[in-house]
Amino acid sequence: MNDAKNIFCLLALCLFVVGCGHIPTSDYPVEVKKVLHAPFERVWNSSIQVIEASKATIIAKDKPSGLITCKFPADKSKSPTYASIFIKPDPQYTGSVSMYLIPYSFSSYPAISYVIYPQEKKGVILKYHHIYVHKDYFSDVCNTFYDQLEDTL
Amino acid sequence: MKQISVVMVITPFVFFGCGPKTVTTTTKMYQLFNTDFRGFAVPEISEIKQGQGKSFSYAEFDEVWDSAIIVLIQQGILVRSSKNSGTIAAIGTVPLSVVIQRGRLVNVYVKVMDDLYKTLDNPDKAVWEFDPNQLEAIYTDFFSKLATQVYAGKKWRYLTLAPTPATKVHAQASKEAPIKNAVPMSEIVKYKPHPAMISREASEYFIPVWPIATPSQTAIVLNSNGVPPAARTAFLTALATLSRWTWPGTISLKLLAIPINGLPISSAVSPQA
């Protein structure tokens, strides 16, 4: 009787574990590199167009490097998103480019730290900045940008 | 009752009137974000050379340049870049300035732009100062990644976080994701040792130890291209769907590693999305 009870408990435990377990899946597709089948010049010009159409601010661009850094205005995140875009001719496919795009979210922390300057007898509330990859906005920005870019191309 | 009211009214004046005066200030770096980096200039090349330099043999300038961008773009935003002058400025986990020089050997120098941690109200004081060990760790990490990208790269798969002064999380992440096929640092000609940059007056500041308050704390970047072997997938990736929000400074980096379930994957080097 005890054996049967033990087996039943073990079975119940197994069912519980298996039932509650799940195979990890990701809702965060990691794709920071994309191959575009278009020449560098076209991709560069289209990228600039997309950025300007998005009302983003271009912080830096260097065509010989293939690098554009821009700031997308605050939207859902209530904080701006910075993105560096790197376009380089793909060595494997003639007439194609590899594009790397990584958007960073920005946040700041006013009044989060209290620094004491003992000699001056005053406290200073510092404003820190912080940039990080936000997995939701990462996908949003990447997908939106790539969609618009492909439309423009 | 009246006495208690009087005490309650007077007490704040005693605390705030006689206590230390409080002002709100910010750092140069914070101000740059507010002004979209207008007016920001990459430090002079001679100043960048005061950091650390290494020579890369058997590599073209373009290879090293592109590799440097690929490495830096994953550590923060590249706010300045000029291929003609060979300079890059990246603001991220640590603000770095880089100069890459053409020649028989491609020389690369990197320096932490520590002056960006200075406060606006008192430019002589910085909210963060790096000690020589921290600088050494930052430079070693950068050159290690750059060497990997230049010599064994061609793939987007080695990236981890750069070490940040105050976080052990980053160091742990680096240990768990070792660089594959990395060229040993001994094979790279060491160009010049970094100068001993001694932290001054650091003891007079209260630098908070909790992660959220450290300046320029974390640039959480991807440490996976989605193709790690199943055995090396961190168990915390299972939490990816549960933890919807990345909370700066406190999130486990493994949340950003892509969980896989052992299904076959494409062997293409440059998969198309």
Image: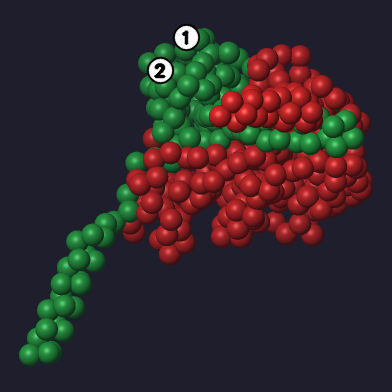
Residue A148, numbered circle: 2
- What residue is shown at x 85% (from left), y 32% (from top)? A121
Q: Is residue B251 left or right of residue B206?
A: left
Which residue is pictured at 51% across the width and 16% down the height?
A: A73
Looking at the image, residue B17 sits to the left or right of residue B260; the answer is right
Q: Residues within 10 Å of mark 2 (few under 14, many from 20)?
A: some
- Between residues B80 and B128, which one lies in front from this camera angle? B128
Residue at the farthest left position: A1
Q: Is residue A45 above or below residue B122?
A: above
Q: Which chain, by letter, is green?
A: A
Q: Residue at (73%, 59%) from the top-left corner? A: B184
Chain ID at mark 1: A
Q: Are marks 2 and 1 in contact (CB under 8 Å)?
A: yes
Please name the residue that numbered disc 1 is placed on. Answer: A53
Amino acid type for the residue under numbered disc 1: Ala
Percent coordinates x, y for residue B77 in the rendering = 63, 29
Q: CA distance from mark 2 to mark 1?
A: 9 Å
Which chain's colour is red?
B
In the figure, is residue A123 to the left or right of B220? Answer: right
Image quarter for residue B75? top right
Q: Can the viewer see residue A129 in this picture?
A: no
Task: Name the chain letter of the residue that bears numbered label 2.
Answer: A
Query: Helix, strand, or loop for circle 2?
Result: helix
Q: Residue at x 40, y 45 (%)?
A: B243
Q: Secondary structure at mark 1?
A: helix
Closer to us: B182 or B233? B233
Observer-nearest residue: A9 or B190?
A9
Q: Give residue B25's position: percent from left, percent from top.
A: 74, 24
Q: State which quadrant residue B177 falls in.
A: bottom right
**Where on the picture, by quarter, is residue B168?**
bottom right
